[in-house]
């Protein structure tokens, strides 16, 4: 078995292109569409994740008083508070876009920053490949679970083909 780590959008694309046999994703609407179109089968619900809106403690958009995620997004947009979007077609990004749609907003402008194409992403990858970054990956969860939850690059090399 060979594992490939990818966001929901890329994982679904790999499945559609028959480059992988199975995927675990969190993009329910897209998953159901794939079943309907016939290029995916046997969708199973195996878990869920949480979606949080986080920001600075001083709450410049005043989202702490929001009554819903869409209301929080509307406050962010009206206050032009900086919003960082993954912009990567992942399940998280799809959820974000559905909230903007519910809020009736098409986010744009200097305050709406899509992070996938920024130089900071390259710097972050460099950090993850560094000795301290690899230690974090290797040791994450070790204290709580007795072993790390992730494998480092050295371990992963034997499965990189």
Image (tube, grey):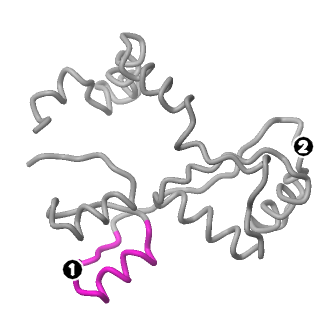
Q: Secondary structure at mark 2?
A: loop
Q: Which residue is mark 2?
A: 60
Q: Residue at x 15, y 27 (%)?
A: 157
Residue 99 found in image quarter: bottom right
Residue 73 found in image quarter: bottom right
- The vertical placement of 128 against 84, above or below, is above
Q: How many marks?
A: 2
Mark 2 / mark 1, whichever is N-terminal? 1
Q: Residue at x 84, y 47 (%)?
A: 81
Q: Residue at x 16, y 60 (%)?
A: 20
Q: Which residue is mark 1?
A: 41
| First to last magenta residue range | 27-45
Could you tell whether 18 is left or right of 85 in the image? left
Residue 10: give x, y in percent of width and height: 34, 57
List the single residue furthest toward the top: 131
Label 2, residues with CA under 10 Å away: few <14, some 14-19, many ≥20? some
């Amino acid at each position: 078995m060979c594992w490939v780590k990818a966001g929901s959008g890329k994982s679904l694309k790999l499945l559609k292109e028959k480059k992988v046999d199975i995927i675990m994703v969190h993009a329910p609407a897209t998953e159901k569409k794939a079943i309907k179109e016939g290029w995916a089968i046997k969708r199973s619900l195996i878990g869920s994740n949480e979606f949080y809106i986080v920001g600075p403690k001083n709450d410049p958009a005043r989202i702490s008083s929001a009554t819903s995620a869409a209301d929080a997004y509307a406050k962010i947009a009206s206050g032009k508070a900086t919003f960082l979007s993954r912009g990567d077609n992942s399940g998280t990004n799809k959820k974000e876009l559905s909230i903007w749609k519910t809020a009736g907003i098409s986010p744009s402008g200097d305050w709406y920053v899509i992070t996938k194409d920024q130089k900071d992403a390259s710097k972050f990858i460099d950090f993850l490949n560094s000795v301290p970054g690899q230690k974090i990956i290797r040791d994450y969860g070790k204290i709580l679970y007795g072993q790390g939850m992730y494998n480092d690059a050295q371990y992963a090399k034997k499965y990189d083909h």
